[in-house]
């Protein structure tokens, strides 16, 4: 165990062995090294626990808690209770932090005492780690971020943030009523006690894949975010801003391949665009949209 770390990194994981090594290595190779790394193994059955034991034996900064499954929100709060550092960095077991992420976020929080959270721009990557595009709608300044959160948009990436532990504990941590979108609620409540910001650099590779929480139970997530935004406006005594999200669109794997192909093509990541255009074609060879995506990806624009 590390004594008096400046940063406590909290990462829950459930059956995440496929991407776990990349995620853990990206934390351990940060240019800023004064941290403890709290990993909550939330009842994994895929060999995650065994891999984490190997890491913990090799690096004293790692603390692994393995127990029965309790869900992400309870795991996050457990990590907060164990954290020794005055700063909390979030990380997910399927993402990749750039080497200077912690260094730059620590510097920002030292220089901006009125801020309680800082995130960063993020690069979307596909299940195999190929670049898709920069995540859209990332705002840099507090007023923009808060307004977008109230509009039920997504201007902060949860595994990209660093927060002041005192502020997170002041507002009571993550609300256990929310099994998903607990970050959206936390960010809105943090915005009521301090300022939020994002760094302009891309410091996280944010993986898109079909097993992630964001790809499952979309309808319930939309209704949960609406409930969270309404609760925030009620606390603040302000009207709920437009737009209120409509009915959630359920996307098939082919729909995601289509999105990833076009997003990658527009961002100039032609190789990624081609991979997902051909995945579309394999799934729906008689679909005109599949052939159009393949044609444009092969052409490169």
Image (tube, grey):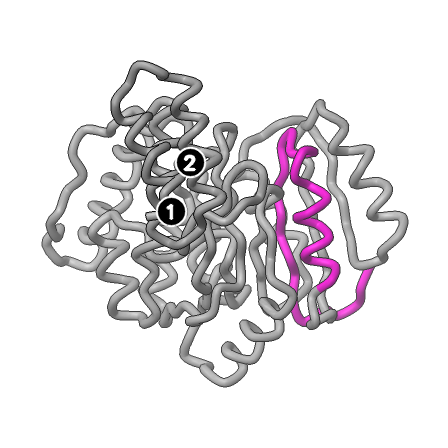
Left/right placement of residue 30 relative to residue 114 reads right
**Residue 156, image x, y percentages:** 39, 57
Residue at 55% x, 64% y is 165
Return the residue at label 2.
214
Q: Looking at the image, is 191 positioned above or below residue 47?
A: below
Left/right placement of residue 124 relative to residue 98 reads left
- In 3D space, how far apart are the residues under numbered discs 2 and 1 (Cα atoms)? 29 Å
In the image, the segment drawn in magenta is 1-29
Instruction: Using the image as rendered, state which of residue 205 and residue 215 is in the foreground.
Output: 205
**Residue 75, image x, y percentages:** 59, 40
Residue at 54% x, 72% y is 105
Whether label 2 touches label 1, CB < 8 Å: no
Instruction: Using the image as rendered, state which of residue 106 and residue 130 is in the foreground.
Output: 130
Res 179 visible: no
Left/right placement of residue 204 relative to residue 133 reads right
> Which secondary structure, mark 2?
helix
Q: Earlier in the sequence, mark 2 or mark 1?
A: 2
């Amino acid at each position: 165990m590390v004594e008096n770390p400046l940063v406590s990194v909290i990462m829950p994981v459930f059956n995440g062995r496929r991407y776990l090594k990349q995620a853990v290595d990206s934390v351990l190779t940060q240019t800023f090294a004064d941290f403890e790394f709290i990993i909550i193994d939330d009842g994994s059955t895929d060999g995650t626990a065994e891999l984490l034991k190997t890491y913990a034996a090799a690096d004293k900064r790692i603390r692994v808690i393995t127990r029965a499954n309790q869900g992400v929100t309870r795991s996050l709060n457990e990590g907060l209770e164990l954290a020794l550092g005055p700063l909390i960095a979030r990380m997910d077991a399927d993402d990749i932090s750039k080497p200077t992420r912690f260094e730059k976020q620590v510097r920002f929080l030292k220089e901006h005492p009125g801020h309680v959270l800082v995130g960063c721009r993020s690069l979307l990557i596909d299940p195999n780690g190929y670049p898709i595009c920069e995540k859209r709608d990332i705002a840099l300044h507090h007023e923009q971020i808060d307004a977008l959160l109230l509009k039920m948009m997504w201007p902060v990436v949860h595994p990209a943030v660093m927060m002041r532990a005192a502020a997170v504990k002041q507002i009571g941590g993550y609300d256990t009523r929310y099994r998903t979108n607990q970050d959206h609620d936390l960010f809105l409540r943090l915005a009521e006690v301090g300022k939020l910001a994002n760094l302009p650099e891309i410091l996280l590779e944010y993986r898109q894949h079909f097993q992630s929480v964001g790809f499952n139970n979309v309808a319930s997530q939309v209704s949960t975010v609406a409930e969270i935004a309404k609760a925030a406006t009620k606390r603040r005594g302000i009207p709920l801003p437009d737009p209120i999200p409509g009915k959630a669109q359920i996307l098939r794997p082919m729909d995601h391949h289509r999105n990833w192909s076009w997003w990658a093509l527009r961002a100039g990541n032609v190789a990624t665009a081609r991979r997902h255009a051909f995945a579309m074609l394999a799934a729906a060879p008689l679909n005109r949209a599949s052939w159009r995506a393949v044609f444009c990806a092969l052409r490169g624009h």
